[in-house]
Amino acid sequence: MASIGNITFACEDPNALATFWTAAVGYEMQEPPPGILETIEAEGGDPNAVAAAIDPAGYGPRLFFKKMPCSSPEHIPIHLDLNAADREEEVERLVNLGASVVETKIETTGPYTETWTVMRDPEGNGFCVQSPPEQ
């Protein structure tokens, strides 16, 4: 059975976006393997072409950021959902880190009501922040 190794972001500025997401989800920047930056520069490449962030506890998938053209973020059919005990407080924290709010939605199914806020990271990638369903 396969497991998720990376969640990859196509982006304009890998280091800046990796910095945002490390702060957003409590990850750490992953140092490149020894000698790789020197090799990239010697071959005429951009040392900011890639960046990575890892879960310090070792459980979550690596977030990988690669400098490359990306499609319009409005049309990407997959996004991250972040869970937060206090959604409003977390949204405010993420806005202070550089994210923007698109809208807040509420959906009731039977006895459960879910509330989530649709957001965009500094490069426009969509994600949501949700709190546990209320009953």
Image: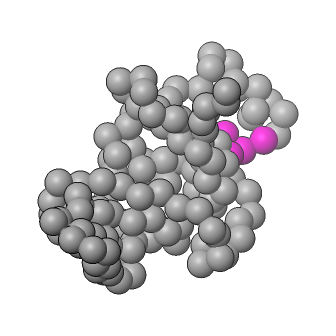
> Relative to 45, does residue 76 appear above or below in the rendering?
below
The percent position of residue 97, horizontal first and vertical second, equals 31, 60
Q: Which residue shows up at 76% across the image and 33% down it?
A: 40
Magenta span includes 46:
yes
Q: Residue 71's quadrant in the figure?
A: bottom right
| Depth order, front residue of 80/115 | 115
Q: Residue 132's quadrant in the figure?
A: bottom left
Where, quadrant-wise, is the C terminus in this rendering?
Answer: bottom left
| Depth order, front residue of 102/104 | 104
- View extreme (front): residue: 110
Q: Which residue shows up at 39% across the image and 81% down it?
A: 102
The percent position of residue 36, horizontal first and vertical second, equals 69, 24
- View extreme (top): residue: 34
Residue 51 visible in the displayed image: no
Where, quadrant-wise, is the N terminus in this rendering?
Answer: top right
Query: Left or right: 21 with respect to 10?
Result: left
Q: Which residues are magenta?
A: 45-49
Query: Left or right: 65 with respect to 56?
Result: right
The percent position of residue 108, horizontal first and vertical second, equals 28, 78
Q: Which residue shows up at 53% across the image and 61% down it?
A: 79
- View extreme (right): residue: 43
> Relative to 89, does residue 49 appear above or below in the rendering?
above
The colour scheme used here is one colour
> Relative to 81, does residue 48 appear above or below in the rendering?
above
Q: Which secondary structure class fits the magenta region best?
A: loop
Query: Left or right: 42 with respect to 133?
Result: right
> Relative to 102, does residue 115 appear above or below in the rendering?
above
Query: Left or right: 88 with respect to 4?
Result: left
The percent position of residue 8, horizontal first and vertical second, equals 63, 47
Residue 45 visible in the displayed image: yes
Magenta span includes 118:
no
Q: Which residue shows up at 59% across the image and 78% down it?
A: 74
